[in-house]
Image (spheres, rainbow, N blue to C red):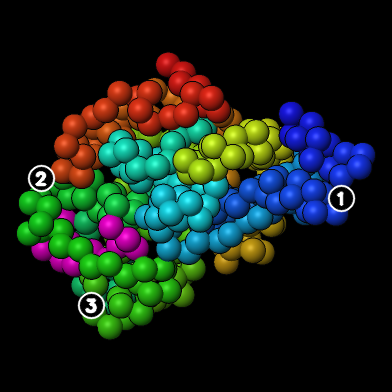
Amino acid sequence: PCGRVLRSAGGAGAGAGAREASRAASTLRVFGVPEHFNAPFHMAKERGLYEKRGVDFVWHTEPKGTGAMAQLLEAGEADLAVMLAEGATARAAVGAPLKVVGTYVSSPLRWGVHVKAGSGLKDKADLKGKVFGVSRMLSGSHLMAHVMAHQKGWDLAKDAPLKVCGSLDDARRLMAAGEIDAWLWEKFTTKFLVDSGEWDIVGEVPTPWPCFLFVASARGLKDRSEEIRQVIEATRPVCEEFKANAGGATVSYVSKHHAMSEADAAEWLGGTHWACSNEVQESTLHKTQEALVTIGQLAEAVPLTNLIDPSVCRLVS
């Protein structure tokens, strides 16, 4: 279908302006965090796999994470984003102009609970009443800090106060200045800070659901639904290859590009599984909504069909 669109726009007798319009029509603005999970997109782009399907794939890195990507989608400044399941559900459930359109990574995310080295904080229990840094409100770092606090039976406002930091680099600066006491982030992304002695890790909070979903803006779904399908399909075999780690290629790539030892890269890869499909498990949307209601970020769960776009995505039980 994408090819037909391009031919009809730029066929015989069409001028340069029409051909330019056809290229513009196929541009897909895709956003994700600067983390190892997203390497398959860069590999597929370098190999011309999106171009072969008639899609002008434009990748944007968003270091401030899921909360920031939700804002871009809602403003119509992004067509597709790879977002944490809990953050995507939080926005879709309140009727924001975005929908879940698939599952990217089907394994849980391992959130590390980080503190400043030498702080004397040794355990998650020591963080009661301490200030938790978060990248954005309704970001994964915010929601998982409160999931952890709820698991501990703490009063969220009193025992787990929050301070918005922005990016990981901002969190490092504010941790060093003593303005935050704790920071939850994907443990392998921050491992270099633990190894260097800047931070300590005092525990983990794994998500009880798949970590990354594909989320599309209302504008993207209206104008680019076929391009969204094509990108998911083109990326899937690269994800399978990346997971297979033939000849240790993936471990070497992750170690080289993401400040990780080969042993850490191998451990991360062993626990990571890509779905890269236009399907979402019903349990993913049930569990994220239950957690959001429990921590007071969602008044009540909504029907699962409110969260997805059925023209692109299929719910599976």
Q: Is residue 159 above or below residue 248?
A: below
Q: Nearer the viewer, mark 2 or mark 1?
A: 1
Which residue is the site of mark 1? Answer: 15
Distance from Cα at disc 2 to Cα at disc 3:
24 Å
Q: Residue 271: tell me if it is visible.
A: no
Range shown magenta = 125-137
Which residue is the site of mark 2? Answer: 153
Q: Is residue 40 magenta?
A: no
* Residue at the image position 41 percent from the left and 58 percent from the top: 68
For the residue pair 135 and 204, the one nearer the viewer reads as 135
- Residue placed farthest to the top in the image? 317
- Cβ–Cβ under 8 Å for marks 2 and 3: no
Amino acid type indicated by mark 1: Gly
Residue 134 vs residue 226: left or right? left
Q: Position of residue 228 (x, y in %)?
A: 61, 38
Which residue is the site of mark 3? Answer: 179
Q: Position of residue 313 (x, y in %)?
A: 52, 26
* Residue at the image position 58 percent from the left and 30 percent from the top: 277
* Residue at the image position 52 percent from the left and 52 percent from the top: 78
Residue 288 occupies quadrant: top left
Q: Is residue 127 magenta?
A: yes
* Element carrying mark 3: loop
For the residue pair 189 and 303, the one nearer the viewer reads as 303
Q: How many marks?
A: 3
Upstream in sequence: badge 2 or badge 1: 1
- Res. 95 mark: none
- Cβ–Cβ under 8 Å for marks 3 and 1: no
* Quarter that holds the N terminus: top right
Q: Crowding near pointer 3: few (<14 within 10 Å), some, many (20+)?
A: some
Q: Nearer the viewer, mark 2 or mark 3?
A: 3
